[in-house]
Structure formats: C-alpha cells, structure tokens
Amino acid sequence: MDKHARIYIAGHKGMAGSAIVRSLIAGGYDNLILRTSKELDLRDNGRVTTFFAESKPDYVFLAAAKVGGILANSTFPAEFIYDNLAIQTNVIHQAYVQGVKKLLLLGSSCIYPRDSPQPMKEEYLLTGALEPTNEWYAVAKIAGIKMCQAYRRQYGCDFIAVMPTNLYGPNDNFDLQTAHVLAALLRRFHEAREQGLPPTLWGSGSPRREFLHVDDCAEACLFLMDRYSDAMIMNVGAGQDIPIVELAALVSEVVGYRGDMYWDRSKPDGMPRKLMDSGRIAALGWKPVITLAEGLRLTYGWYRQHLGASQDGVA
C-alpha cells in the first residue's frame, strides 16, 4: 500500500479496527478514512453506496461487526446474523462497484466445525456442523468469506479473508452480558478484588482457547494486505492454547485477586477446543510478538484506565 493511499477502516472504534488504525499510523499511512457507526450505519445500503461513491477508498479493512460471547449470541441470534450479513454485503459489494484495489475481511475462528481436528487448518471450513452457541455469527462470517471468494472469481476483485483466533486488548468489550471469555474474566476478577467477593465463572473451565493480542493481529493484517492475494482464507493465531481454568488463574494473578472462585457448570462451555493452525502465515514470514502474560498485563492496565468507558458489544 502506498503511504498516501486512501484507506477505509470499517469499525475503527472497535478493538480490531482501532488496532489497525494504530498500526497504520505507526507505519506512516496518512490518508485514513474513518466513520463512526453514528456517522455511517453500514447496515444501510443507501448510505454505504453514497459513502463509497464520495470517498472512493483505494483499500478497505472490513473490521466492523456485531460481536459478543456465548450469552450475547444466544440472546440476540437475529441481530448477530442480520447485522453482520448486512454490513458485509453492503461494504463488499460497494468495494467492487467503486473499484477498490484490495479489501481485507476480518473473520473469526468460530467459522470452523465444532468437532474440527486440532489445530484447525483453513481447509477444514465447511467440513462439519458448527458450535450451536455461536452459529449465528459463524454463518454470517462464512457468508462474508464466500462473498469475497465469489467476487474474486467472477469480477477479479482482490478481496482476501483473514481468520484471527480469539482477540483481546485495548478497546475490548468488558460488558458481562456480551463480552468474550478473557475480557469477562478480567472484569470479574477485578470486581472480586474490589468487592472482596469470590467470582462465579461460566462452565467447567476445561475448554482450551487460543488468544492473540489485537496489536499482533493488526500487524498481521497489514502484512497480509501487502503480501497475500488468494481466495483461500488465512488463519492468524498465537500458535498455542490454554485451558480456561489456567487462564482464570493467570488473570487472577495479573489482577491481584487471591481469593476463591466458583465454576457454574450449568452454563455452556462452547467448543471443547479452538486452536488455529497458523503455519501458512508463518511460512510467509509473520509471527506474533506479544506473549499472553504480557498482553494480559497491558490489557488490564488499559481496563483500569477506562473503567467508565461505554462497552456496547458493537465493534
């Protein structure tokens, strides 16, 4: 990408989008196009059409999405599938109409089958049933992937799809009704320390999850925008996972909580394991640099500085 190219980051206020903005600015890119969801509702086809016709971006990072954890997916299935389908459909189509040079769609590891072999390779997509607790979001993301592939095949568009593992970091969503597991744990243990009450955690603690700091993910996105062009999706992960029970212990240590914790086994665990095979991006020369322990410390520091910040679950 040229340093002066017009670059639109959809969802720049969210965790992933804001990290991409930070990486672009640090890299010397000086012509960023940014719109909040209030300024531009990406679910509105008419407004998106007008925006692309007027702004004519050269490159698009599609990081805007309706996101959330197990509880949010279970509570708002219609919103998760409608909002994400609408956002992706409008942005991808208008990128084609206006001749965008390249578009990068951010997906999610939840696109892979619940019982997928581990670690999960890109070719495992659509080889089995999805995890029921997040299928609405997963189906929408799979549709976005297929749309990128279809536009590449029919129109020759250079649209790529990147599948990050579980992300965390600055601007994460800490609302306990909609948060993902790591952010929820940070908040629960912080409140437990402040209130002197033991936290109640969801599930058995046995599932294993992989976590990637969002700044590493952003660097991977810039790397791929410059070095990758293919219909095959690209995994981006940390290369190792951890049981939730061990993650809880690590979070409690970072937060400074020394008391008991309780596991509510009546709550769902989600997929037993989600570990990405990131061998293809590693072969291209990219690897993460922020360890989980360091990333947790950085994220908790950010959380303590932004306790009053609004977290609504929309990136």
Image (cartoon, rainbow, N blue to C red):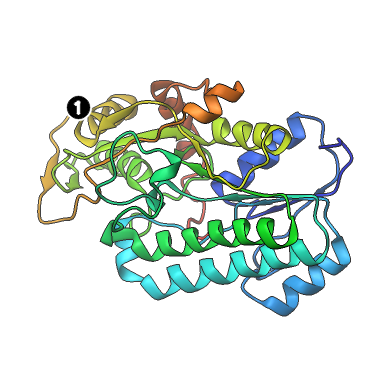
Residue 164 shows in this picture: yes
Would residue 189 be found to the left or right of residue 279 on screen?
A: left
User: Residue drawn at (82%, 55%), measured in percent from left and top?
Assistant: 57
Query: Given the current orientation, which residue lies at the most extreme bottom position?
Result: 46
Residue at image coords 35%, 40%:
182
Number of numbered labels in the structure image? 1
Q: Position of residue 99 (x, y in %)?
A: 83, 59
**In x, y percent, where is residue 102?**
75, 49
Whether residue 31 sits left or right of residue 198 in the image: it is right
Q: Residue at x 42, y 63 (%)?
A: 139
In this picture, is 44 found above or below 203? below
Front position in the image: 74 or 194: 74
- Residue closest to the eye, 106 or 235: 235
Q: Quadrant of the N terminus?
A: top right
Front in this rendered view, residue 72 or 242: 242
Q: Going by the image, does 37 lie left or right of 257?
A: right
Up/down of 66 relative to 162, above or below = below
69 on left or right of 160: left
Using the image, determine if residue 83 lies above or below residue 312. Answer: below
Q: Which quadrant would residue 211 be assigned to in this image?
A: top left
Residue 275, image x and y in percent?
Answer: 34, 35
Task: Name the image quarter holding the C terminus.
Answer: bottom right
- Other-residue count near label 1 (Cα within 10 Å), few / some / many at <14 / 14–19 / ≥20: some
Question: Where does the image place residue 34, in percent across and percent down from the top left?
Answer: 75, 54
Task: Residue at 28% x, 56% y: name it.
Answer: 131
The residue to which callout 1 is attached is 258
Q: Residue furthest front?
A: 154
Badge 1 element: loop
Give amino acid for label 1: Arg
When asked about the image quadrant of residue 207, the answer is top left
